Amino acid sequence: MENAKSNLAKIIRERRSIKSGYIDKEVTEETVLEILDDAIWAPNHGLREPWRFIFVSTKEKEGFVENLVKTFSTDMQENRRNYFSQPAAFLIVVMEEDPRQKQWEENFGAVSSLIQNFQLLAWEQKLGVVWKTNPHIYDPKVRDLLDVKPGEKIVGFLHMGYFDKVPQVRDRTSAEEKLTVYKN
């Protein structure tokens, strides 16, 4: 008989990236702040808290998408308009870039941990999230649109929305197959 999984283990295994199929339900600032208030407890070296967030609400999304698609070439704008119109809201996660490699990597690890916390906590509330790192996060025009400063990195756009249908489970390689045990 398999050991009973903890609630946390179940949520980790059940969480899916919700990329489409969002329903018409507002994602509120209050919900996002509530989730972030827990997600920020991610481990971060020296408690540097190297993150900040830009929330695009359901109410502001249409105008944001119109401004965002203008950063793309004319031939891509309609495609990107359709793509960015699907989520109900966005959370853009921005990281302080430390010029020292070790601290940069620690900061990126911390922000990644925070994003995972956010995804798990959102899932618990039936809010779907997918972390997107498409090329536009590097585009100077997108950085200007979002007022991302030199010394900051857009780590990703979190597309968010409520959903009805849970994507199928995709198998993972067992940890045992990836584990090497060091021996003298």
Image (spheres, helix red, strand yellow):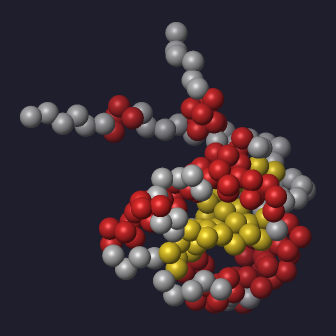
Res 120 visible: yes
Direction from residue 132 to residue 125 in the image, left or right: right
Residue 106: percent from left, percent from top:
40, 63
Q: Quadrant of residue 164?
A: top right
**133 shown above or below 181:** below
Q: Residue at x 69, y 72 (%)?
A: 54
Q: Quadrant of residue 81?
A: bottom right
Q: Residue at x 58, y 26 (%)?
A: 6
Q: Residue at x 64, y 89 (%)?
A: 144
**117 shown above or below 170:** below
Identity of the residue furthest to the top in this view: 1
Direction from residue 109 to residue 58 in the image, left or right: right
Direction from residue 76 to residue 89 in the image, left or right: right
**170 shown above or below 131:** above
Direction from residue 149 to residue 90 in the image, left or right: right
Residue 42: percent from left, percent from top:
53, 53
Q: Residue at x 65, y 86 (%)?
A: 147
Res 21 visible: no
**60 shown above or below 45:** below
Residue 25: percent from left, percent from top:
89, 55
Q: Which quadrant would the C terminus be assigned to in this image?
A: top left
Residue 73: percent from left, percent from top:
67, 89
